[in-house]
Image (tube, helix red, strand yellow):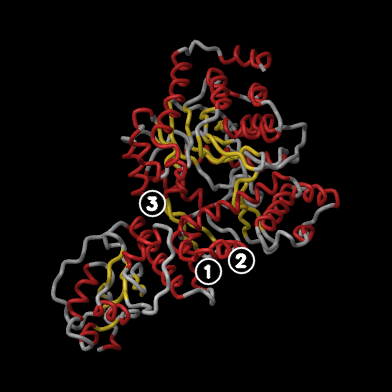
Amino acid sequence: MTLEGWQCGLGELLQRGASRKRRNANVESSLDRLDLTADERRSLLSLSDAPGFALTCHITRWWRELRIRTGARLTCVQLSSSNRDHVLDYIDSNPFRSFFFFVEAVSFLDYVLAQAGVHATVRAVARFEKALLLAHDARESNGVSEAPVAHCLAEDVQLVRNADASLVALDRPAEILLAMLLKGQPATPKERRGAYPVLVSPRLAHLWRPASRAEARLFRQTRAPVLFARALRQSRSTREAANSLIADGILKRARQPDPVHH
Amino acid sequence: MKKVQSALHAPQFAPPEKIGIGFTYQSGLRPAVEAARGLIDFLVISPELLCRERADGDRRQFKLRKPLIDDALSACDGRPAVVHGLELSIGTVEGWEDACVDLIDEFARHYSFPWLSEHLSFMQTRDANGAVLYAGAPLPLPLTEAALDIVVPRARALGARYGVPFLLENVTHYLPDLPADGGRDEITFLNDLTERSGCGLLLDLYNLYCNACNHGFDAECALSRLRLDRVVEIHVAGGATHGGFMMDVHSDLVPEPVWDLLNWTVPRTQNLAGITYELLEQAFPVLGIDGVVSQLARARQIWTKHLTTSAHAPEALSRQACHDA
């Protein structure tokens, strides 16, 4: 058997063995694409029957589960008793592609957010946790730059969100939610969804803080660059909100004024 | 994969200077490094653990997090750091992981290191569409001429690329009856590899011990057949047992039989430059600082004992080895 054939065959068998769904599929079909003699095929298949092979599959799955449960800890707690099913479904439907806790955790959170049947509270926790992970990653990678010097914003300035900043709507104060989740207790769903907006940014000391109503409104307006004068028409408190959001690295002045807004 | 020049100079093994006792670095182990600073002579840094991954189309990219490296080095008062790669997949037929080489290139632009090491394994193959299929764990190479043909020029190229000794580490594996030719076993394969490539050996005694237990051979007898003059670094660690297999997890204190193997090996390795205790950061809360300190102190005791009695004659000891075994 060629080295390439052996490696590819072992790789295919491992993928099958590490997947809960594929584990019981016809093992021989895993090797169909490879140009193997009957003896070579038999040799690889006998390998896949060995207890050591099962352990190798277990190790790859175990490491992925560890990365997910560590990296997306809050969401796994909120998923409560269904978290193992979600984690295993995710592993089955997403081939392994990274040893990085951050990459695996964000990928898992995207998977959770894409699930139709997920409860609103789980969804909010997943959004919050993903925002925290992205902000933390940005802080570790880029450091935290000096806060811009506060000065009076001209009305012809355009404001836009920083890519690393987020606004997440929670159904209770974030400190209460975090305290519960960090103690391993899932939060019970509440009727007042999204009543507690939270800002997340690499420049914030703890990565998050509550958002005022004016800040939340302004953040929502700035998905694309928006002329400050236009935002000011919404509320008298917009100027104060703009200043605080800029100071916390959540909004920034857009580099090029868009002539369409003039 | 970037082209590997196979026709480099005739392989020449040049051992680095002796350093002493090393400890693996992960951010979660920083308190242990600070507490045990007096027992640590060098850090073992895996750049893949201190970088961020970015996808660039189908290609992976690792970007070094320089502040994290600086933080690691400052925790150890600027003592040297050796580079221990994790994901190169040096044995994959289709080519190694370019992102790892780019990452080490970046590391080398900012920091010097006395040697570089990687695992003798493969972690990727290709699926039916030619896309990369990640194994998710290091897998052993067959003990064949074909595997040597793949690894030898790459090992040579890496040594030449960074101008420091390149070491390959023996890995733990759980697969029975690896394909072999020429009557090779793990030891003769390692000997052929170091001889042909000029690379050094990172002898992981815990991995060897696991393989000996899992596959039923005598570790000390195996060591007596190994080219110990090529051993530059030794790893010791502890792990767990699962389903009757000893697993390489770096989650525990070093088992006594591995200390015995270390005691046996050190006086026979004249080019040994360092002994490293490996620990996973997740295991640190269980072992605590006292646990880490005890392991580093014991490794240092063995290092010092054999270094100060450097009148040892490795060749004579090697000859004696088979009788001992």
Q: Mark 3 — residue? A: B65
Residue under the point 43% across and 58% down: A184
Q: Is residue A69 left or right of residue A22?
A: left
x, y percent for residue B320 = 64, 13
Q: Residues within 10 Å of mark 3 (few under 14, many from 20)?
A: some
Q: CA distance from mark 1 to mark 3?
A: 27 Å
Q: Is residue B276 left or right of residue B182?
A: left
Disc 3 is attached to a residue of which chain?
Answer: B
> In the rendered structure, which amino acid carries the disc numbered 2?
Ser
Q: Which residue is mark 2?
A: A93
- Label 3: state its secondary structure: loop
Q: How far is the residue under mark 2 from the one under mark 3? A: 31 Å
**To which quarter of the image does residue B203 belong?**
top right
Q: Chain of mark 2?
A: A
**x, y percent for residue B277:** 47, 32
Relative vertical location of residue B179 with respect to residue B232 in this rendering, above or below = below
User: In screen coordinates, is A17 left or right of B50?
Assistant: right
Residue B235 in view of the camera? no
